[in-house]
Image (tube, grey):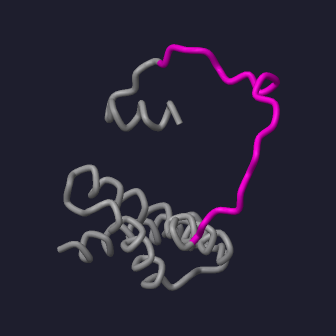
Amino acid sequence: MKLPIAYALFYPDRRPMDGRKVDFFKVGTLTFEKPDLETFTGLKLAFEAAKQGGSMPTVYNAANERAVILFLERKIGFMQIPELIGMAMENHKRVASPSVEEILLAERETYEFIERAIN
């Protein structure tokens, strides 16, 4: 978590991090739990985008990218990030096997959708 926190604190700059790297042999055992998809709706949407495949992961990524920028600019609240992602995914007509041009079009259309959604 140190790296994401450092990115958040010093955004948009990147600062070198001091400190020791994690020694997994000293850590020993790691425990993993099933994620709470009702609480972490952004993660639920990411799984859904991956499941649908095609152009949907592009839409998820583009919507997340724009929503996070809007949050950092204080134009939306934190909890609106997954709301906007979900709206963008619902609005999108998935392309099963998109070409590069279709991926770029899906990205551009998602950016435009997000802009319209907040205005």
Report x, y in % for residue 46: 57, 66
Which picture quadrant has residue 112? bottom left
The percent position of residue 43, horizontal first and vertical second, equals 56, 64
Which residue is depicted at the point 43% across and 61% down? 64
Q: Quadrant of the C terminus?
A: bottom left
Pick the residue in front: 75 or 94.
75
Name the spot of residue 68 as percent of width and height, x first.
35, 55
- Report the front residue among 78 and 47: 78
In the picture, measured across the screen, residue 117 lies left or right of residue 79, that is left
Residue 27 lies left or right of residue 79; in this view the side is right
Point 42% across, 84% down: residue: 91
**In this rendering, position of residue 23 left or right of residue 56:** right
Query: Could you say which is closer to the camera, residue 18 or residue 52?
Result: 18
Quadrant of the image occupied by residue 78: bottom left
Question: Is residue 43 rendered magenta in the image?
Answer: no
- Tell me if residue 62 comes above or below residue 102 in the rendering: above
Q: Does the magenta stretch include residue 25?
A: yes
Where does the magenta region start and end? 17-37
